[in-house]
Amino acid sequence: MHLPAYERDPCATTLETRILGCGEEKGRPFVVLEDTVFYPEGGGQPCDFGTVNGVAVVDVQKRPGGLRHFLEAALPEGPASLRLDWTRRFDHMQQHTGQHLLTAVAQDQFQWGTMAFHLGTQVCDIELDAPAITAAALDDLETAVAAEIRARHEISARWVSPEGYGQEPVRSRGLPEGHTGDIRLVQIAGVDLNTCGGTHLRHTGEIEALKLLGTESIRGGTRLFYVAGGRVRHRLRAHELRNAALRTLLGAPDEDLVSALQVKLDQLLTLERRSRKMEEELAEHQAAALAALPGAFTEAHLEGRDMAFLQKLARGILALAPAKALFLTAETGGQGIFLLAAGEASDLDVPAAGRAVAELLGAKGGGAGKTFQGKAPSLAARAGALARLREMGH
C-alpha cells in the first residue's frame, strides 16, 4: 500500500513531488499531486493549509480521482514544491490526539462513551453519553487525562485487513459507510486503540496540556468543551490580559473582580432607574407645557432623545389636548428621528402627512391610524417638512 507523505511522516513540512493533473471545481482551481504532505478534511479533522509552488492551498478534499488540492490560483502540470503550514497542522494534531486520550479516559475510568467529536477553530468538543456531569467529576476527569499526558505514552499507526480488524480490541464508533479494504488503526500504547485516518502526535507528552472548559446538555447526553496544547497557553494569555485590564478598570485584585463588577452593575442599575424616573417626570412637564400652547398644531425638537421618549411625550400631550396634531423630532447618534401624531379630535390625515414628511426628509418610516414615525439620515429638511404640514392645513 502506497501511503501519502502526511501518513508516512506526520512531522514532514516540505516535499518535492509532481502535479499530475489540474482542473476547476465550482470555480475553484485545484491540482492532483503524485504525493502530498497536506491532510484532506475528514474524520472530524480540518484539512491542512500551505503552499504549492508558492501558491496558497486553501482546501484539500477527497474525491474519487484522488485528493484535490484547491489553490488560490491555477497551476500547470509539472514539478511541485510543497510547504506545509506547520503551526496549523501541529495544533490539529494536539487537539485530535487530545480527543483520543480524553475519549479513552472518559470511557475506561468513568464509563462515558463518546458519540461525536468536533475540532473547532477556537475550542473542541466531544459528545458523551452521560446525561449530566458534575463539576467534581469534570475535575477528576481532567486530572486523570493530565496523568496520561505526563506518562508520555507512545502513539503509532498501522493498517490491518478486515479479517485482522475483527481480532483487534478496537474502541470505535464503527467504520464509515461503504468502507472497503484495509483499516487504519491509531494506538496510544497501553491506553487506546481506535480506527482513525487523521494525523497524530508521537507521544501523549506532546499534547502538553488539556483543559476542560465546561459542558452543555445535548440530545440526552452532554457536550464537553476542551482545548489542548498551544490553545491552553493562548487561552490563558488572553485571560491574563483581560484580567489585567479589569484590574485597572475596577481597581481590584483578581480574586475580587467579580464582586467589584457586581457592585458597579448594582450602581448602574440604580442610576438607570433614577434616570428613567427623571425622564418620566421631564416628559410629564414638557407634555403639560406643549399641550398648553395655543393652536391645533404643535412641533418641538428635542436634542439627544430617543423614539421612546418622543412616544411618551406624544401620549402625554394628546392626553391633555386630544384636538392637537404633533410633529416631534430628535437627533441622536448622528441620525434623525421624527414622530407625527394626532389626537382623537384632530382631523389630520396622519398616514398621508407622514408619507409627505418622510419623502422630504429622505426617511424610512411607517405607522397606522393616528401615528407615523421614522428615521432619517439628517433633519436638514425639517423646516421644509414643517412648511408642508402647514400647507396640509396644520
Image (cartoon, rainbow, N blue to C red):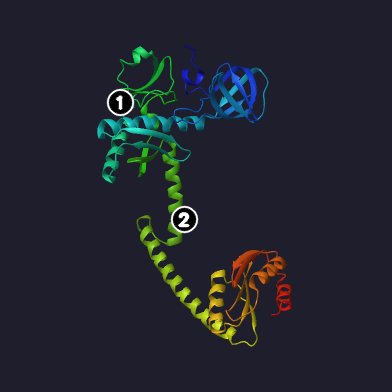
Q: Position of residue 114 (x, y in %)?
A: 34, 33
Task: Return the residue nearer the eye: 316 or 229.
Answer: 316
* Amino acid marked by disc 1: Val
Residue name at image x 53 percent, y 81 percent = 319
Task: Return the residue nearer the eye: 162 or 303.
Answer: 162
Residue name at image x 31 percent, y 33 percent = 113
Q: Position of residue 220 (x, y in %)?
A: 32, 41
Position above or below: 289 against 194: below
Position above or below: 113 against 292: above
Label 2: which secondary element: helix
Q: Mark number for residue 245? A: 2
* Amino acid marked by disc 2: Ala
User: Is residue 147 in sight in this rendering?
Assistant: no
Q: CA distance from mark 2 to mark 1?
A: 42 Å
Q: Is residue 376 left or right of residue 102?
A: right
Label 1: which secondary element: loop
Give the mark, 2 or 1, whose residue is nearer the N terminus.
Answer: 1
Q: In the picture, residue 320 is in which quadrant?
A: bottom right
Task: Return the residue nearer the eye: 261 or 111.
Answer: 111
Position above or below: 36 against 240: above
Q: Position of residue 250 (x, y in %)?
A: 43, 61
Residue name at image x 43 percent, y 53 percent = 243
Q: Is residue 287 left or right of residue 257?
A: right
Q: Position of residue 375 (x, y in %)?
A: 63, 65
Q: Is residue 95 left or right of residue 78?
A: left
User: Is residue 346 in sight in this rendering?
Assistant: yes
**Quarter the C terminus occupies:** bottom right
Q: Nearer the viewer, mark 2 or mark 1?
A: 1
Task: Return the residue nearer the eye: 136 or 236.
Answer: 136
Packing grade of label 1 (10 A; few <14, some 14-19, many >=20) is some
Which residue, given by chain and number where applicable, does mark 1 sit on?
Answer: 191
